[in-house]
Image (tube, rainbow, N blue to C red):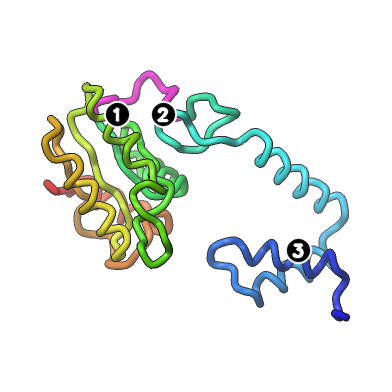
Amino acid sequence: MGLLPAPVERLAEEFARFPGIGPKTAQRLAFHAASRVPPAVLDGLAAAITATAATVTPCPVCFFLSDEGQLCAVCRQPTRDRQLICVVEEPGDVLAIERTGEFRGLYHVLGAALSPLDGVGPNDLHCQELLDRVAAGGVKEVILATDSDLEGEATATYLLRRLEGLDVQVTRLAHGLPMGGELAYADERTVARAFSGRRQA
């Protein structure tokens, strides 16, 4: 028989599913929710989670977050340069780039990076959809903005090979991003410098 009520145990288990949250942090969050957060706040949190699960879906074009299968806020903007596609791993990377104000093109969210050890291969990413977008025409440059860790570099190399033969320039973010760093957590100036100094891939 456990010392904690079953709902608290389950809440800690659910928190632990999130990236970057280990068992101790998950338990601390569960304790906080159970003992310090007013019920009305917990109800609001539960409602937000339920609404997210019910209505938020990937954009059918770029796979950024959207409402119920509609185009995302970026794809809907008519002023975006549709000749530029920036390829990122996760939705959080889009926000990191948008904060810089340096990029006015469109995005393509892969959903992850290649990681054979974790069983993540090309078919688990939105790679083919990217190739289809480029092959459809109208795209002049694809910017590979995957993370600078081993998985991100492997993903960029794979996409570079797949994009060969298509009539498109492929570039890679330049200096500024630390080796092994994640784009979503880089500061705005670092991301802006990496964009302005991007190089031929």
Residue at point 59%, 68% (across, down): 21
Magenta region: 74-83
For label 1, the SS is helix
3D distance between C-alphas at marks 2 and 1: 9 Å
Residue under label 3 = 11
Badge 3: how crowded within 10 Å, few (<14), some, or many (20+)? some
Give the residue type that dot 3 points to.
Leu
Quadrant including the N terminus: bottom right
Name the N-terminal-most of marks 2 and 1.
2
Residue under label 1 = 133
Give residue 61's mark: 2
Determine if the magenta segment contains residue 79.
Answer: yes
Find the residue positioned furthest to the top: 78
For label 3, the SS is helix
Residue at point 44%, 36% (across, down): 63
Name the N-terminal-most of marks 1 and 3.
3
Q: Are marks 2 and 1 in contact (CB under 8 Å)?
A: yes
Count of numbered labels shown in the rendering:
3
